[in-house]
Image (cartoon, helix red, strand yellow):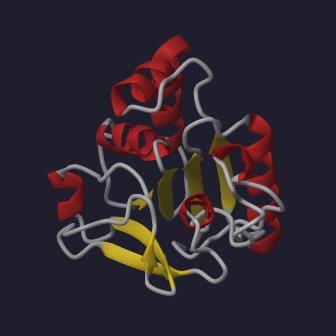
Amino acid sequence: MSDAVFFFGGYHASQHDIDAWLRSARMQEPSVEFIGFPWPKTAGAGAASAVKHFSEGGRYDATIDDIQGNGADTIYIVGHSSGCAIANAVDAGLEWTENIVLVALDGFTPNADQLDRETTQVWGATCDGVKSRNFPGHVKGRRKVFTATGCKSEWALHFSLVNANARDGLVDSVAKGYANCRANLSFL
């Protein structure tokens, strides 16, 4: 069995951030193929802006082609925060989804058809009773919860779903979300 992960970073996730996440992920799971995408530089935080700017220059179509041409047995399409909008749109553009696992990490919820698939995962995080920024509500039984430690502040808890090293004091803004990154791969 082979796996591939297509990871879409959230609002303002830079290429440097994605590279840090990819390095950590590849060290933890060397048999898994990891591909990462930074936030489109000119996009706002909203779903429509994210998808529009990701689509420029044929990137959306090329990504769909890459996923559909990938030979992995299971392909994870993972979005974090606003990056879930792009992950959801890419998933929706696929011709088939039999081997696809759509993963939303504390971000935009997949649509009703995507939530109907038993493999879809919608994640939120908790720490000592505090819930993450976009903690999922009723999502057709697809909700999964990561229990973080040392992450009661808004940004640390939000980023704990992508960075297992996120802690209060270390991650106190979007710009520091990937600080000392150890990729959280709980979705695998």
The N terminus is located in which quarter?
A: bottom right
Q: Is residue 47 above or below residue 168?
A: above
Q: Is residue 167 above or below residue 82?
A: below
Left/right placement of residue 176 relative to residue 103 reads right
Q: Nearer the viewer, residue 114 or 69?
A: 114
Q: Nearer the viewer, residue 8 or 135?
A: 135
- The percent position of residue 113, horizontal first and vertical second, equals 16, 53
Left/right placement of residue 27 relative to residue 8 reads right
Identify which residue is drawn at 77% across, 73% down: 28
Left/right placement of residue 97 relative to residue 17 reads left
The C terminus is located in which quarter?
A: bottom right
Identify which residue is drawn at 49% across, 43% down: 83
- The percent position of residue 187, horizontal first and vertical second, equals 51, 72
How many labels, in total?
A: 0
Determine the residue located farthest toward the top in the rendered image: 57
Q: Nearer the viewer, residue 165 or 111?
A: 165
Rendering quarter of residue 24: bottom right
Determine the residue located farthest toward the bottom in the rendered image: 128
Rendering quarter of residue 183: bottom right
Rendering quarter of residue 148: bottom right
Does the image show residue 101?
A: no
Identify which residue is drawn at 19% across, 69% down: 138
